[in-house]
Image (cartoon, helix red, strand yellow):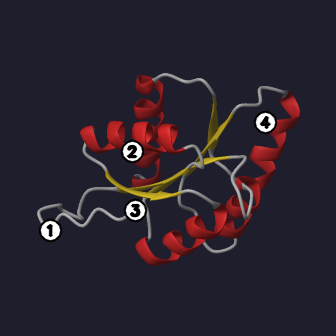
Amino acid sequence: MIDDDPSVSHSRPIVLVVEDDSANRALMSEVLKIHGFHVEEARDGRDALNLFENVGPSLVIMDVKIPSVDGLEVCRRIRTGSNVPILMVTGASDANTAVEIQKAGANTFLSKPFGIDQLVQRVEELIIQSSSG
């Protein structure tokens, strides 16, 4: 979903939120918009890859388990040509999932359920880190 509001300043950091659960996607998007981010949304891996190429986000937040192309594979594909920060979210809490997320190239991850403050803090940290070099 693209924010078509002409008053929106695209100088704000663009965050691509990739989540197949519409309620979770809407919640994350709204919270990020409230905190000043421009948000683009995708519900599956194929849409995520297309949007990534078209909008050039400052950060990607992505569920590990998404349809069409799973989040780990999307992460690997993004990493072939970009160092954009990637924050993975997962319902799994086992050590193997954490290792797979790291191997795929994500910067960090959050385990579901996570707090809104936790999400915003992690996003802000990643954007600051990526802009400082």
SS label for mark 4: helix
- The Cα–Cα distance between marks 4 and 2, rounded to whole angstroms, is 24 Å
Amino acid type of the residue tagged 1 in the rendering? Pro
- At 51% from the left edge and 45% from the top edge, which residue is drawn? 22
Amino acid type of the residue tagged 4 in the rendering? Ala
Mark positioned earlier in the residue sequence (3 or 2): 3
Whether tag 4 and tag 2 are in contact, CB under 8 A, the answer is: no
Q: Position of residue 43 (x, y in %)?
A: 56, 56
Q: Position of residue 54 (x, y in %)?
A: 45, 77
Report the disc number at residue 121: none
Front position in the image: 96 or 28? 28
Number of residues whose C-alpha sits closer than 10 Å to that of mark 3, classed few (under 14), some (14–19) or many (20 or more): few
- At 88% from the left edge and 35% from the top edge, which residue is drawn? 96
Mark positioned earlier in the residue sequence (4 or 1): 1
SS label for mark 2: helix
Report the disc number at residue 29: 2
SS label for mark 1: loop
Instruction: Return the residue at label 4.
Output: 98
